[in-house]
Amino acid sequence: MTHPGPGLGPYALRAARHWQDFLPDQYAQIPPPDREAFFSRIGTEIEQRIQARTDQLTPDDPAETAQPPDYLAGLARLMTARAEAEQQVLDEMLPAPPDPEDPQDAEGTPGS
């Protein structure tokens, strides 16, 4: 199995590794010369979704909060929102494979 291209960004690289590990048949169907562009597009989409989700999770106006603006508090709020957004988007776009030991996963039950 070939390794993802060195020019990939962190989310593209993560997507490529995810496909290699959990979707090897689909990964093998992508022609090797096209893989870098394919995963770069996925990585860009992940980054854009994370940014959009972060924006949704953080207030635009500090006046909307009950506390006066504080740089460190604002930074902590932004970092927390970013981490939460990243986890949500990665879970959506690169879901964990079903657990064969879990009857719900084996059945493909949505919402688990």
Image (cartoon, rainbow, N blue to C red):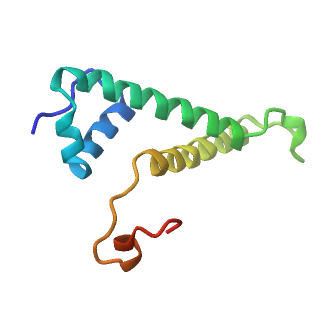
Residue at (41, 76) in percent of width and height: 104
Residue 30, image x and y in percent?
A: 22, 31
- Estimate the x, y position of residue 68 in percent, counting from the top left: 87, 40
* Most distant residue in the left direction: 1
Q: Residue at x 40, y 31 (%)?
A: 42
**Residue 112 placement, left or right of 62:** left
* Position of the N terminus by quadrant: top left
- Camera-nearest residue between 58 and 91: 91
Q: Could you tell me residue 75's position as x and y percent?
A: 66, 37
Quick check: 67 above or below 49?
below
In the rendered structure, the answer to whether residue 42 lies left or right of residue 13 reads: right
Residue at x-position 84% and y-position 36%: 62
Is residue 81 depicted above or below 109 in this figure?
above
The quarter holding residue 105 reads bottom left
State the residue at coordinates (86%, 44%). 65
Task: Pick whichever, 50 or 19, lies toward us.
Answer: 19
**Could you tell me how many numbered marks the image carries?**
0
Percent position of residue 49, x then y: 56, 35
